[in-house]
């Protein structure tokens, strides 16, 4: 007797879902165009500016690491390897768009208008690193994993209710996509068709936990399906692909169509943070080598050099200028007065209750000696 065929094939259902999320790419590892249709409409000047920002970010990472080792910076999360994911997506933003970064997203924050001195103060835990100018449309980096997504959903809805054509950009890592805040945020934003672009920077590890142990989903982009919003996966080491996808997502959200979820496939060359993580305990040299061969600076450098827009001399000039900028900024941060316990108490309330006033008086008396 022939075996009766089941009316529902769950494996087929999953295969169909997974097939809907290919990885979008413009440049291969050698910097050659592999998808002409996705090449973004950027002028030569804009291409050079994007590369300049990526080189700036690589130098900032190197110098920040050195400053941390010297005890001149506090908390620091390395960014090398994620320049395309971070700076090319930010390149699609407009000045009036709102940025809600995670703790690894300081490069985007500085490019959005935060003075580098204040970024260094934030790393040191100084309150001065959180006092933003009114025209800076951003919030300080969020330390709680994924919490910026919830905040972004609220800001995005505010944009929509005010009839603005601006968009909120927010970032988290693959680990953040496993948090409850992530699901709540994209569901809320989707339900209200809020003006948001939600970016997951999938660098393969949530600290030391491999991405494949966090979820059974074949892509993180497909998590958008449950929220009823578009999801797309892009080669996060390819600056042109990242920019093209982010720009399309921004324009879509700005027109009131609702949010978009973007997954960038990227890699951090360094540890999760410089606060004790050792990536050699959970990553192999072979894995590091495979991703370093995909380096975003190398492929974009090759692409621009072929077009006659880049040179070794130009890059060296940018490197030296960035080092001077960092040197000046850290010197300015060093001049800012150290915080006192009385300062922390004063920052707790706009109008201090009597108990806090008494504590302030006690510490001010101690600090004056």
Image (cartoon, rainbow, N blue to C red):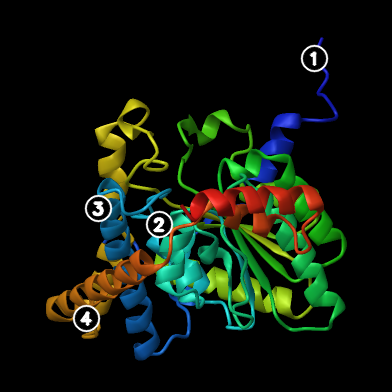
Residue in view at x 25 percent, y 34 percent: 285
Q: Nearer the viewer, mark 1 or mark 4?
A: 4
Label 1 or label 3, whichever comes before in sequence order: 1
Q: Which circle's residue, 4 or 2, is located before the other in the chain?
A: 2
Label 1 crowd bin: few (<14), some (14–19), many (20+), radius 10 Å: few
The answer to which quarter of the image holds residue 132 is bottom right
Q: Position of residue 194 (x, y in %)?
A: 80, 68
For the N terminus, the image quarter is top right
Secondary structure of residue under mark 3: helix
Does residue 267 lie above or below 284 as drawn? Answer: below
Q: Which disc number belongs to residue 82?
A: 2
User: Badges 1 and 3: C-beta atoms under 8 Å apart?
Assistant: no
- Residue receiving disc 1: 2
Give the CA separation, mark 2 to mark 3.
19 Å
Q: CA distance from mark 1 to mark 3?
A: 70 Å
Does label 1 or label 4 sit earlier along the sequence? 1
Mark 2 touches mark 3? (CB < 8 Å): no
Picture quarter containing residue 157?
A: bottom right
Which residue sits at x=87%, y=64%? 192
Q: Quadrant of residue 215?
A: top right
Labels 4 and 2 touching (C-beta < 8 A): no
In the displayed structure image, the side of residue 251 where residue 193 appears, left or right: right
**For numbered disc 4, what is the local secondary structure?**
loop
Q: CA distance from mark 4 to mark 2?
A: 21 Å
Residue picked out by circle 4: 310
Marks 3 and 4, the one that precedes in the sequence: 3
Query: Which dot, 1 or 3, sits closer to the camera?
Result: 3
Q: Is residue 29 visible?
A: no
Is residue 121 toward the left or the right of residue 283 in the image?
A: right
Q: Nearer the viewer, mark 1 or mark 2?
A: 2
């Amino acid at each position: 007797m022939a075996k009766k065929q089941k009316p529902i094939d769950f494996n087929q259902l999953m295969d169909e879902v997974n097939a809907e999320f290919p990885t979008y790419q413009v440049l291969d590892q050698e910097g050659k165009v592999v998808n002409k249709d996705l090449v973004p409409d950027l002028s030569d000047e804009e291409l050079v500016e994007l590369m300049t920002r990526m080189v700036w970010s690589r130098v900032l990472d190197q110098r920040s690491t050195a400053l941390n080792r010297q005890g001149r910076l506090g908390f620091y999360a390395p960014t090398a390897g994620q320049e395309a994911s971070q700076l090319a997506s930010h390149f699609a933003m407009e000045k009036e768009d709102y940025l809600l970064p995670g703790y690894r997203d300081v490069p985007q924050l500085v490019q959005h208008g935060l003075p580098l001195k204040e970024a260094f103060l934030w790393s040191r835990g100084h309150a001065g690193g959180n006092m933003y100018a009114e025209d800076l449309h951003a919030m300080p980096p969020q330390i709680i994993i994924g919490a910026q997504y919830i905040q972004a959903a609220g800001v995005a809805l505010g944009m929509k209710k005010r009839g603005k054509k601006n968009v909120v950009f927010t970032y988290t890592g693959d680990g953040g996509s496993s948090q409850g805040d992530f699901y709540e945020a994209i569901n809320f934003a989707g339900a209200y068709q809020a003006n948001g672009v939600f970016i997951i920077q999938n660098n393969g590890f949530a600290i030391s936990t491999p991405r494949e142990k966090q979820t059974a989903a074949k892509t993180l982009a497909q998590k958008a399906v449950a929220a009823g919003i578009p999801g797309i996966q892009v080669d996060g080491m390819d600056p042109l692909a990242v920019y093209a996808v982010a720009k399309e997502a921004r324009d879509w959200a700005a027109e009131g169509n609702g949010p978009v979820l973007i997954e960038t496939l990227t890699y951090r060359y360094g540890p999760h943070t410089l606060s004790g993580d050792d990536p050699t305990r959970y990553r192999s040299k072979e894995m590091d080598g495979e991703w370093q061969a995909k380096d975003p600076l190398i492929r974009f450098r090759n692409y621009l050099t072929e077009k006659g827009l880049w040179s070794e001399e130009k890059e060296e000039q940018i490197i030296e200028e960035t080092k001077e900028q960092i040197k000046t900024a850290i010197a300015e941060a060093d001049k800012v007065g150290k915080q006192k316990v009385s300062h922390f108490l004063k920052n707790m309330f706009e109008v201090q209750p009597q108990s806090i006033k008494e504590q302030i008086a006690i510490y001010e008396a101690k600090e004056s000696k």
